[in-house]
Amino acid sequence: MSDRIELPGPDELRRRLEDLRRSRGFLLPHHGAMAAALPDLHEAYFVMYRALTLGRRHLDDFEKEFVWMAVLVAVEEAIGTHPLDRFLTAGGTRPMAEGIARLVGYAAAARNLSFMAEHWGPYLPGLDAEASYGAGVEALSAGLGVDPGLVDLTLAATNAAVRREAGMRFHVRAAYRRGVPEPKLAEALSLIIWPVGVTHFLDACGAWHDLMATGAVSPSPAFRVWAETPAQGGFDDAAGRRKG
């Protein structure tokens, strides 16, 4: 049996929660649950939170908060008022937020048009699902005043957050065509970990890996190493053979 974790007493727990409130500016119910019963997880939680949401990597502040806004709207995460504040502080506006909401709503069209083309193609001659979807994205984003590459990052993450693979793949390919740096794509997709979990991020990276491995996109040398590394399934051995 593993060593037991020493839990804080009432006075220590009260102090920790008040320290947290002062440092963050707010307190949420799960903070208390972790602090009282899972202090090691509580510490790791905030390390990851700071790294994922507050650290500066490849996206600038505006780009990151633009993606964040779209993801939170897509998953209807109403508690995300602090990302909303960061979005406005980074240069976002109310009309821009409205435009993000329209893009998020339209993102489902990638899957819907793919469905129509696959099943009703003979009855809708000339239907090009990707061209139609792309035209809609272009029209909706025309007045936003942001780089098209940022729109692709945003909608790749949005579609990944709600597991709409057709749209996610479309925007990954578009990002490569526009020359969007791969680290920016990785960071944008990673933001979905916080509101929807690692498994959604895993699925998104699996689809991205497939695009690289099949030649649908041309990765940089560093990302090609990832694309060419075998046995990335949970049941595969080092040689790529299925276990059992």
Image: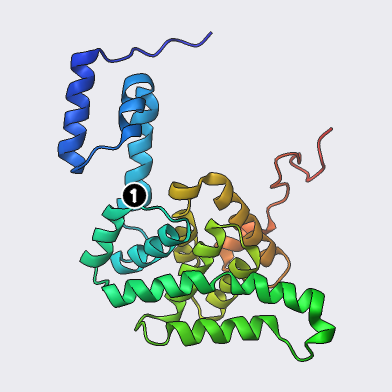
| Residue that appears at 39% across and 14% down | 5
Q: Nearer the viewer, residue 202 or 117?
A: 117
Q: Nearer the viewer, residue 32 or 6?
A: 32
Q: Position of residue 80 (x, y in %)?
A: 33, 53
**Is residue 18 shown left or right of residue 114?**
left
**Which image quarter holds the C terminus?**
top right
**Is residue 54 shown left or right of residue 111?**
left
Q: Is residue 173 above or below residue 194?
A: below
Q: Position of residue 197 (x, y in %)?
A: 51, 45
Q: Position of residue 22 (x, y in %)?
A: 15, 37
The local crowd at label 1, few if under 14, some if 14 to 19, many if 20 or more residues have their Cα within 10 Å, is few
| Residue that appears at 40% across and 72% down | 100
- Mark 1: which secondary structure? loop
Q: Nearer the viewer, residue 151 or 31?
A: 31
Say which quarter of the image contains residue 204: bottom right
| Residue that appears at 84% across and 85% down | 122
Residue at label 1?
79
The reply to whether residue 167 is visible in this rendering is yes
Q: How many marks?
A: 1
Q: Is residue 59 above or below residue 132?
A: above
Q: Is residue 95 above or below residue 207?
A: below
Q: Is residue 154 above or below residue 137?
A: above
**Is residue 209 shown left or right of residue 2?**
right
The reply to whether residue 217 is visible in this rendering is no
Say which quarter of the image contains residue 8: top left
Q: Position of residue 87 (x, y in %)?
A: 28, 64
Residue most extreme to the left: 22
Residue most extreme to the front: 123
Q: Amino acid at mark 1?
A: Ile
Q: How is the image coloured?
A: rainbow
| Residue that appears at 30% across and 68% down | 62
